[in-house]
Amino acid sequence: MTETAPHSASALIDELRHIVGPERVITAQAERDYYSHDLFFWDKHADPLAVIKPDTRAQVPGIVTAAARHDTAIYMRGGGMSYTNGYGPETARSIILDLSGLNRIIEVDPINRFIALEAGCTWAQVVQALSPHNMAVDFAPPLSGSHSTVGGALAQNVPSGMQGVLGLEVVRANGDVVRTGSWASRNNGKPYSRIFGPDLTGLFLGDNGTFGIKLAVGLHLKHRAKAQAFASFAFETYEAMATAMIELSPYDFITRRTGLDPYESQSIAKVSLKDAIAAAAKIAGQERGLTGGLKAMVEMAAGGLDFMAGVKWSMHLKVESHSDRAAEDGMAIVKTICAKHGREFPAILPRAREAIGFSIRKFLGKDGERWIATSSMWPLGRAVEVASATEAFFKAHKAEMERHGVIHSYVTNFGQHYFLSEPCFYWHDELSELHFRALPTDEAKRFKALSGKPDTRAFVRELREKLRQLFFDMGAIHVQIGGFYDFTKAIEPTTLSLLQDLKGMLDPEGRLSPGKMGGLRGRK
């Protein structure tokens, strides 16, 4: 960006106040600091000039053109649940555009099977809007969907769901508003088809806001399945669970698949799903055909006891179909495969996950420990190899981790074409204002007294960077690239050249999210 006279900052603020109203331009230092930080600590951070909170889509082009006139960068923020520095400013000559106020449902069309909504809608709003129609999005919303926005998920990418995005309304860096897919049709355009010429929708997915600002989204709808079946399985090793995931991968009737390590298996029932466990156990207790052992464990869970005692690695699955018989037949296939590598135990956790819908409580440990994840995605056939390499990594650093009191865990998943491994770290440290504002009042009060552990924090940062490097060397890809993963170093030079050309065309001055996506820069 070019040099600008010092007085233009105040002129920009005045212009933005005129566009959105004085109350929607935040300049207080504490609030600018709050809106600049995500769930992790980042040393490279600059305070923005202001946080802008538009409440209509029509205001955003004016904000963009005003920032351009004053040579100011724009970073986009949705629900704030990033942990890869997705929106933290890397230049002080910037504003943060908080899009959470763009939260209107535009249209629900059950016949043509789409919902059009503003990008600041949370996933919980989407579920509520579709409930009267007995429909759901053809998407896998994040667990943090009570706070996370649809636009944020699309900017960061979410495994197993981006194919359900039918169209976008986007603001370019020059202020132009464009639509994609059938939504771009001049005559009564509606977002019912993603394909209308080149797939421009895909261009703006997973871009971390570097190509354009998402204002509105069209998502594909499906009818809710009439029948569901749940199952949980315990495994002795990560490799055994990964092997089962590979064998289960061809069966698309499995619609929820979550693998947990020993730490997560024991803690998740006491943290994010705690309140739903007893109710789920009562439902499970009504099932026919429970053996004596399974029935005893269900009764334990209903009474609040530890029904997962002794479970190491665990996998929790949901099957959906058009009838109870079809769902049970599908689950029979699942059970046959998993029985070769582990053992079944009562499906309390997947039932509880279904009941609770969304929860952000998992972003901390049981006693308020800080949490951070490092994601990686792989071809399905490499699942066991990745499991072994990751286990070896943690074994090599075990002594140091114990000295710092750092605990690691895993969340794993698999889809039609990928295996996801997401090792996580928990450690004792002070919490941020983002945590306190999102937590229930009682827990926020309880965790206020936690003190900072800068040495441990530095160790976690270093260890996470080493893990990132391991995954890089092995050829992982990632979602939530943000400002953490080495995207521009990981892709082929010719592909990088194409992306640089696109960035240079769409954002020639580099004003949208500079420094993100591995520091992607355009070529003028």
Image (cartoon, rainbow, N blue to C red):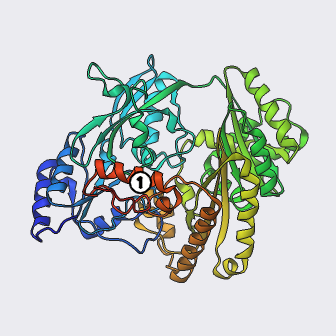
x, y percentage for residue 289?
86, 31
Q: Quadrant of the C terminus?
A: bottom left
Q: Residue 374: x percent and y percent?
A: 58, 61
Label 1 CA crowd tier, 10 Å (few <14, some 14–19, many 20+) = some
Image height check: is 434 above or below 246? below
Q: Can residue 188 be seen by looking at this rendering? A: yes
* Residue 79 in sight from this viewpoint: no
In the current view of this chain or complex, which residue is farthest to the right? Answer: 292
Counting the numbered discs, the total is 1
Instruction: Indicate left or right for 504 with 376 as reference.
Output: left
Q: In this view, does 520 lie above or below 119?
A: below
- Which residue is located at x 52 percent, y 29 percent? 136
The answer to whether residue 339 is left or right of residue 24 is right
Question: Is 353 rendered above or below residue 485?
Answer: above
**Front-lying residue, 224 or 216:** 216
Query: Residue 479: x, y in percent?
Result: 52, 52
Residue denoted by label 1: 497
Name the side, left or right, on which 44 lies relative to 278.
left
Spot occupied by residue 383 in the image (x, y as percentages of width and height): 73, 52
The amino acid type found where label 1 is placed reads Ser
Q: Which of 377 and 492 is in front in this view?
A: 492
Q: Residue at x 45, y 46 (%)?
A: 153
Q: Which secondary structure lies at badge 1?
A: helix
Of all residues, the one furthest to the front in this rendering is 494
Q: Seen in the image, is 180 located left or right of residue 13?
A: right
Residue drawn at x 11%, y 65% is 8
Who's the residue at 57% across and 78% down the image? 459
Where does the N terminus fall, quadrant-wise?
bottom left
